[in-house]
Amino acid sequence: MYRKPLVFAAACAGMLLFGIVFLSLGSANNMLAERFGLDNNAIGTLTALLPFGILTGSLVFGPVVDRFGYQWMLFAAALIVGAGLEGLAFANHKALVQLFVFLIGFGGGVLNGATNALAADVSEGERGAKLSLLGVFFGIGALIMPGTLALLSKHYSLTAIVAGLGAGVLLPVVYFALIRFPPPKQRAETFSPARSFALLKDPIFLFAGLALAIQSGMEGMSNDWMTRYFKTVTLAGETAEEWKTQLGLVAVTGAMMCARMVLSGLLKRIRSQVILFVSIAITGAGAGLLMVSGNYFVSLAAALCLGAGLAAAFPVVLSYIGDLYPTQSGAAFSTIFFVALLGNMTINKSFGALAQIHGVGQYTVVMLGCLALSAILLWLVVKQLGKPQNQSTSLNL
């Protein structure tokens, strides 16, 4: 018999690894550029391989964990991440580096989806709170990679540090191997990967997936473009010191992590729908304040609002999905993360093209437009949830 606290701890460890994955390439690209003489175009190729790997891993994990369980999927995904980090540290050919970047992304995609589904499975009655807490460990993991490099780079080579982090992955691997996990949810005769996308026929699932696609795009834009926005818009006309521009990104990511810690408590006391729409209002206030502000410190406050406001949608909506599809949570989370990542890539690529023509200042306009679409879709999700027939949706698919 498995113990829920131990299993949830395993989910947190896996999510922490995904945080390391998410920042791995950005932290190591200087090392790789020096080793292979990479130009910006070659680095751009690597940065495209990482999300492609994450997308592939997100698509693969769901049907597999529903049929075979979580333990060996998490075990294998963590080993793949560890091997990929060791590969980044020691590979001596660009083609091998590309392979290892893809593998890191693939393992990370599996870890991201599987840990969310696992946390939902063992948190009945408090899924929103637990998924918010799980998101905190993503933030911790995201800080480990650049933080470790910053602290130790004066004493050790980047190669040694990255290799050390790769070896550190063995700790959660051993933990995954030792504890008991929930049993598989589907028998062999009911296992069908094609059923994953059949979920999109359900209006709740479709609206939720589209909402998270937009949400993921907004998060991606904030992570990728906030420093550029501070440099070219907030601090335009000034000699922008790098630490000032980086504080904008720190404000977004730090506020999101802190907000999810708070949400893990609030979601046990306040209706999730209330929190969801309050978070939309906070995000809108942050984007609006950033749009009209010409003051650096006011813009930092706006960035804090953006990060705090963006924190709620994923854990709340994923808790709805976990409640609706308890017998096929792996397939449900797999499909919804696939849709969300497609949205992230599409919105970020589109904004890059827009920014090239009209400037990064359009960030706030695009954010407000995306937020309005997301609010409509989330309202439709909540409206559909109020229909009693949807409580048994998963039984009809």
Image (spheres, rainbow, N blue to C red):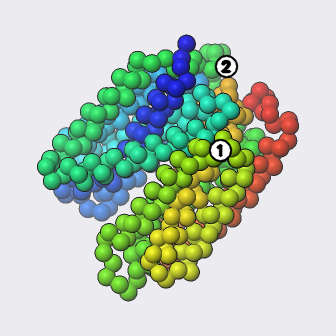
Q: Which residue is mark 1?
A: 267
User: Where residue 363 appears, x then y in whole percent?
Assistant: 53, 71
Q: CA distance from mark 2 to mark 1?
A: 34 Å
Of residues 193 and 278, which is closer to you in this image?
Answer: 278
Q: Residues within 10 Å of mark 2 (few under 14, many from 20)?
A: few
Q: Residue at x 35, y 58 (%)?
A: 44
Q: Which residue is mark 2?
A: 190
Which picture quadrant has residue 371?
A: bottom right
Of residues 206 and 293, which is closer to you in this image?
Answer: 293
Of residues 266 and 181, which is closer to you in this image?
Answer: 266
User: Where residue 360 appears, x then y in whole percent?
Assistant: 47, 74
Residue found at the far top of this picture: 1
In the picture provided, is 167 more to the left or to the right than 295? left
Quarter of the picture holding the C terminus: top right
Name the N-terminal-most of marks 2 and 1. Answer: 2
Q: Residues within 10 Å of mark 1 (few under 14, many from 20)?
A: many
User: Where residue 326 appears, x then y in whole percent?
Assistant: 68, 28
User: Where residue 203 appears, x then y in whole percent?
Assistant: 77, 44
Q: Secondary structure at mark 2?
A: helix
In the picture provided, is 238 more to the left or to the right than 233? left
Q: In the rendered structure, which amino acid carries the disc numbered 1?
A: Leu
Residue found at the far bottom of this picture: 237
Instruction: Judge whether residue 224 can be spotted in this image.
Output: no
Residue found at the far right of this picture: 388
Q: Residue at x 50, y 70 (%)?
A: 301
Decide: is 250 above or below 363.
above
Number of the front mark, 2 or 1: 1
Q: In the rendered structure, which amino acid carries the disc numbered 2?
A: Thr
Is there CB contact under 8 Å for labels 2 and 1? no
